[in-house]
Amino acid sequence: MIQVCSNYNETWVSDCELYRTRCLCDEASDECLNTQNKHLHIDYYGECREMPVSSFSYQYNCKYFDLQKIASITIVCVLLDLLRTRNG
């Protein structure tokens, strides 16, 4: 199983477990331990880690992302590089 990091910066055992938790909360099941989990989604694959931030608060260091597992992050990194270049 591949661990995943949620949008709440919590490491989950698998994407299946994360989606199961979200589903339970979406359906207002008694098994839902936190109603906020109905907004749960995968932020990236792998164990959660602190992402360094540069002098611009929005500019993340893209080398910490596994781009083979998360192809969409490439677009984000390109946009952040453009913003950094534009703002000097």
Image: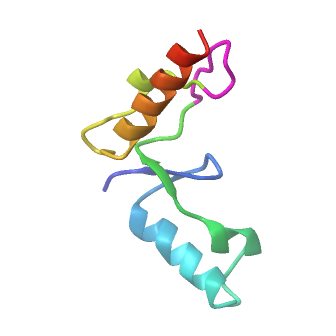
Q: Position of residue 46 (x, y in %)?
A: 40, 43
Kindly give the residue lying farthest to the front in the view shown.
Answer: 86
Q: Position of residue 77 (x, y in %)?
A: 43, 30
Up the image or down, 26 lies above or below 16; here it is: below
Give the residues in magenta.
50-58
**In this rendering, does residue 34 appear at all?**
no
Q: Quadrant of residue 78?
A: top left
The one of 77 and 2 positioned closer to us in this rendering: 77
Q: Quadrant of residue 25?
A: bottom right
The one of 14 and 60 positioned closer to us in this rendering: 60
Q: Position of residue 45 (x, y in %)?
A: 39, 47
Kindly give the residue lying farthest to the left in the view shown.
Answer: 68
The one of 31 and 57 positioned closer to us in this rendering: 57
Q: For residue 51: magenta?
A: yes
Up the image or down, 82 lies above or below 40; here it is: above
- Magenta span: chief secondary structure: loop
**x 64%, y 69%: residue:** 39
Query: Is 49 displayed left or right of 31 in the figure?
Result: left
Query: Is 63 displayed left or right of 52 in the figure?
Result: left
Q: On the rendered image, what quadrant is the C terminus found in?
A: top right
Up the image or down, 13 lies above or below 45; here it is: below
**In this rendering, does residue 66 appear at all?**
yes
**x 56%, y 74%: residue:** 21
Q: How many marks?
A: 0
Colour style of the rendered protein structure: rainbow
Q: For residue 63: magenta?
A: no
Query: Is 69 displayed left or right of 9 in the figure?
Result: left
Q: Position of residue 18 (x, y in %)?
A: 50, 66
Q: On the rendered image, what quadrant is the N terminus found in?
A: bottom left
**x 63%, y 84%: residue:** 26
